[in-house]
Image (cartoon, rainbow, N blue to C red):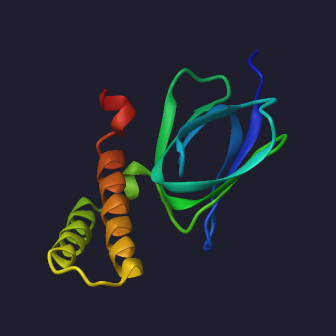
Amino acid sequence: MANTLQLEVITPSKLFYRGEVELVIVRTTEGDEGFMANHSWGVKLLAAGELWFKEAETKKFRVASLAGGFIDVKENIIIFTDAAEWPEEIDVERAKEERRKAEEWLKFPSEDDIEIELARTAIRKSTVRMNVKEGGLKQRQ
């Protein structure tokens, strides 16, 4: 039996996921990082990206989209995020429209760095959502 730890994914509106897992992979602001039982403790910022995890006693990974946030790694892992979605919850047309609007806005950029970064973040989030709907990038590689 593999070592496991408790994973919780919390959004402002709900407990998105709670369960025993063997491995968690997230996109931090430094790149993709994986966490297993007995990992050194830490808190890291998350970029918009895919959440991959292997539930205890299974061979398959599950995937969800995360809208950034942070991960708290101790004996267990807690992820706090503004939004998380399972593939079946994602509205691809809405994600495409959000990306189209942000790309259109960037054609006439403002000199406000914050507004530019908000548009780029909207593009990243919608792209992640579309990738997760299609099974995630790792699944397709």
Instruction: Tell which of 28 and 55 is nearer to you.
Output: 28
Q: Residue furthest front?
A: 111
Instruction: Tell which of 15 and 113 is nearer to you.
Output: 113
Is 68 on the left or on the right of 101, as rendered? right
In percent of width and height, residue 103 lies at 19, 69
In percent of width and height, residue 31 lies at 50, 42
Is 42 on the left or on the right of 11, as rendered? right
Q: How many marks?
A: 0
Who's the residue at 24% across and 66% down the image? 99
Corner quadrant of residue 127 = bottom left
Who's the residue at 47% across and 41% down the image? 63
Is 53 on the left or on the right of 129, as rendered? right
Vertically, is 99 above or below 74?
below
Q: Residue furthest top?
A: 1
Who's the residue at 33% across and 66% down the image? 120
Image quarter where the C terminus lies is top left
Image quarter where the N terminus lies is top right
In percent of width and height, residue 132 lies at 36, 47
Vertically, is 81 above or below 138?
below
